[in-house]
Image: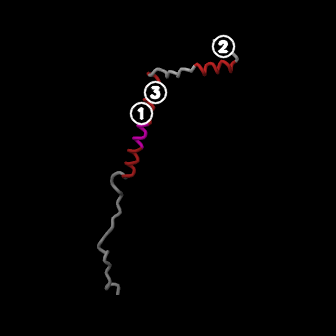
Amino acid sequence: MSDEFEFADKGNKIYETEAKGFNPGLIVLLVVGGLVVMFLVGNFVLYYYAQKTLPPRKKKPVSKKKMKRERLKQGVSAPGE
């Protein structure tokens, strides 16, 4: 009885082999991660260079009105009054 039936996939053999090469997801992750790290390191280097070479920022000049108000708060009379 069992000789009458033949399975269609009897001749087909499935071989399980390990994938060769790198996982594409891993490659994308490494490339994006590398770019992010390069960006952060570049920003740090530029910031450090700018702190050493650029002169300090100039402060905005204080208006006469604000100077007068500050002196009055401190109890010193403003000149000309």
Across and down, in percent, residue 34 comes to 40, 41
Q: Which residue lies furthest to the left in this view?
A: 11
Amino acid type, callout 3: Tyr
**Looking at the image, is 31 positioned above or below residue 8?**
above
The nearer-to-camera label among 3 and 2 is: 2
Q: Is residue 44 above or below residue 1?
A: above
The quadrant in which residue 80 appears is top right
Q: Position of residue 15 (x, y in %)?
A: 33, 64
Distance between the alpha carbons at the discs numbered 1 and 2: 56 Å
Question: Dot 3, how many residues are within 10 Å of its Cα: few (below 14), some (14-19), or many (20+)?
Answer: few
Magenta stretch: give its range. Answer: 33-39
The number of callouts visible is 3
Q: Calculate the distance from the C-alpha at mark 3 to the C-alpha at mark 2.
A: 49 Å
Q: Mark 1 points at which residue?
A: 42
Asked if 43 appears above or below 4 in the picture, the reply is above
Which mark, by number, is residue 81?
2
Residue, disc 3: 48
How many residues crowd around disc 1 within 10 Å: few (fewer than 14), some, or many (20 or more)?
Answer: few
Residue 55 x/y as whole percent: 46, 20
Which quadrant does the N terminus fall into?
Answer: bottom left
At horizontal 66% and vertical 13% (from top left) the residue drawn is 81
> Is 38 one of the magenta-colored residues?
yes
Which mark is first along the chain, 2 or 3?
3
